[in-house]
Amino acid sequence: MTEDSTYGAGQIQVLEGLQAVQKRPAMYIGSTDTRGLHHLVYEVVDNSIDEALAGYCESIEVTIHEDDSISVSDNGRGIPVDTHEEHDRPAVEVIMTVLHAGGKFDNKSYQVSGGLHGVGVSVVNALSESLEIEVKRDGAVWRQQFDHGEPASELERLRAMEAGEETGTTIRFWPDTDIFETTDFVFSTLESRLRELAFLNSGVGITLQDEREDRTQRFYYEGGIRAFVEFLNETKTNLHDDVIYFEADEEIATAESERGAVHVEVAMQATDELQGSLHAFANNINTREGGTHMTGFKTALTRVVNDYAKEHDLLKDLDETLKGDDIREGLTAVLSVKHPDPQFEGQTKTKLGNSEVRGIVESAVHEHLGTYFEENPDPAETIVSKAVEAAKARKAAKKAEELTRRKSALDSTALPGKLADCQTKDPGDAELFVVEGDSAGGSAKQGRNPEFQAILPIRGKILNVEKHRLDRILENTEIRNLITALGTGIGDELDMSELRYENIFIMTDADVDGAHIRTLLLTFLYRHMKPLLERGHVYATRPPLYRVRYRGETYDAMTEAERDSIIEERCDGNPTQVQRFKGLGEMNPEQLWETTMNPETRYLKQITVEDAAAADKMFSVLMGDAVEPRKEFIKDHAPEAEWVDI
Ligand code: 0RA
């Protein structure tokens, strides 16, 4: 090769392209944090998936190596190695170095995956310190190496392929440590995306191997998204045995006025959960922001279920039609569409924009689900009656909401018997302590300043808010007492001008049970009385863990370390007494006043909406039925799960 051909116009263009990627990586892969890092793997895997969808590859192997490099290997046709006319370089080199070159080589196979940003493997190359590609094709094994995206060797022919040896492509890359904040690949992150891809691409086997800890997982699902729904419902109670499944293809004219087809696949199954779980994908991308496919699905589902219910006279004890939310309650559904020219919109480019897709999905679901319902009356009736139940509960909750509002506004004599109210009638000065347990409640009542401090003891665990609908939650005495004491009502009926206390203190023990009760209360406030949090009315008290006495003085410590330094620095290492408070109930009224209630000396933490949202999330994970996320969560957050620091 001569100097000229190395630095020809084509090569300069290549360098400029790679530099653009290196200069603004986020424009191509979203970010340079752990998300962006994992995105590199998905980009390479997507190319192998495309090869599989074209019908030439059934197995993909992803390996995390000990040196934080990744290889992706497939048994497809292999990236072409012959000379590319325009660039006068091997095709594989062009694909690895020219932005968006990948697709142009193969007009026939229609690329349906293409990655979230559809950027191609050259971007992975540009963002890798080093990349090595091995291709088995045209009877030989070929190899080329790259350094920060640029060829570091010519394409070399290593050897002839042996008889029976499969064609394919292996790409190994070492992410650029100057670009990425981290190069630590997380097994579980790759695992969930690769499992998802195996569900979405039925018949493609994907193996994930971690050489750092000798761990291997293989994903292969004949059942496709039907198996996906079974997987999602594994820990739930299904209301009918079979997963409802159908697929449809609809011909469309693509932008280049070529013919193409939109592929629609739906799998769903009803469970007894209160939350629905609807997952929509477009070209293997999880469209978290929804889009036209999701809209079409929801519209058709609502119509089919209502039509069936009316036709079979199942809405008798309901004076209205079923709402979409009623029908989707407890429903697990996976919707997957594949489109020759998908348009992604939205904040995170995870919303499908193609307008023709709405009607395509709507009529596919209308036709196939309608037929399924007629042929399978048992699951159809189960789904309808679950929706009717949800609609009734929705109406009951609405009524209950209105009732709590009216009661608290009109009738202040109906204050809960357990509430020890304060004397002031000015809410601006008043404080409410919501105290865990009757005995601590008793001490707080004796220790408080009754002029402006009110006490409401809450006994035991309040109701699991996640597990029950609002009408059931409102049957719980502790919750009702809290609502009545606060005076505002809840939900849509909430009126802040009726708030009876300026400050609300949640006062629980510093142990696991206390954290649980606090989480339950916060979850309730977050879901049904959010304005209280938004306007900063809610606090957590934090009683000290230790009290140290020395020469007539007392010192409180919030932590063990603080206790030790008090003993060292204030008591010459020889305190008169060290007391450990195990719970609020162990403090006498004076101690409770001084450590937790006296505005001059108490420790407080204001609770923000974000804190409550975190509690809500933790609550869903810890208390919900799904076993896997709970295990993951506890593993990842082990220390915090015990005591949420708010
Ligand atoms: C361009 C053209 C052809 C295949 C591929 C690219 C290809 C790319 C990747 C990336 C990872 N694995 C891959 N496998 C194949 C088609 C070549 C032909 O017509 O034989």
Image (cartoon, rainbow, N blue to C red):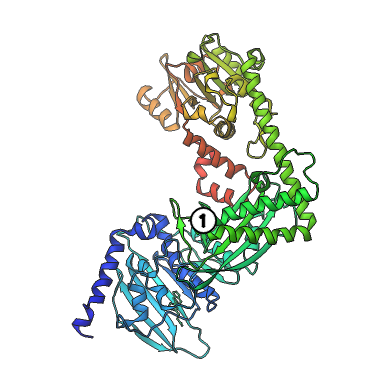
Q: Is residue 135 visible?
A: yes
Mark 1 Cβ and ligand 1 under 8 Å apart: no
Q: Is residue 608 left or right of residue 10?
A: right
Image coordinates for residue 50, horizontal then vertical, percent: 49, 72
Q: Is residue 529 above or below residue 158?
A: above
Image coordinates for residue 84, horizontal then vertical, percent: 34, 82
Q: Which residue is mark 1?
A: 287
Q: Is residue 259 left or right of residue 152?
A: right
Location of residue 224 by image quarter:
bottom right
Out of 245 and 555, give the one closest to the viewer: 245
Image coordinates for residue 583, horizontal then vertical, percent: 56, 26
Location of residue 322 by image quarter:
top right
Out of 501 and 109, give the one closest to the viewer: 109
Q: Tag 1's secondary structure? A: loop
Q: Is residue 384 above or below residue 11?
A: above
Q: Is residue 435 above or below residue 327?
A: above
Residue at (57% x, 12% y) in the render: 446
Q: Is residue 244 visible?
A: no
Location of residue 39 by image quarter:
bottom left
Residue at (59% x, 33% y) in the render: 520
In which quadrant of this rendering is ligand 1 seen? bottom left
Of the 4 image quadrants, the one containing the N terminus is bottom left
Q: Is residue 581 left or right of residue 305?
A: left
Image coordinates for residue 271, horizontal then vertical, percent: 70, 50
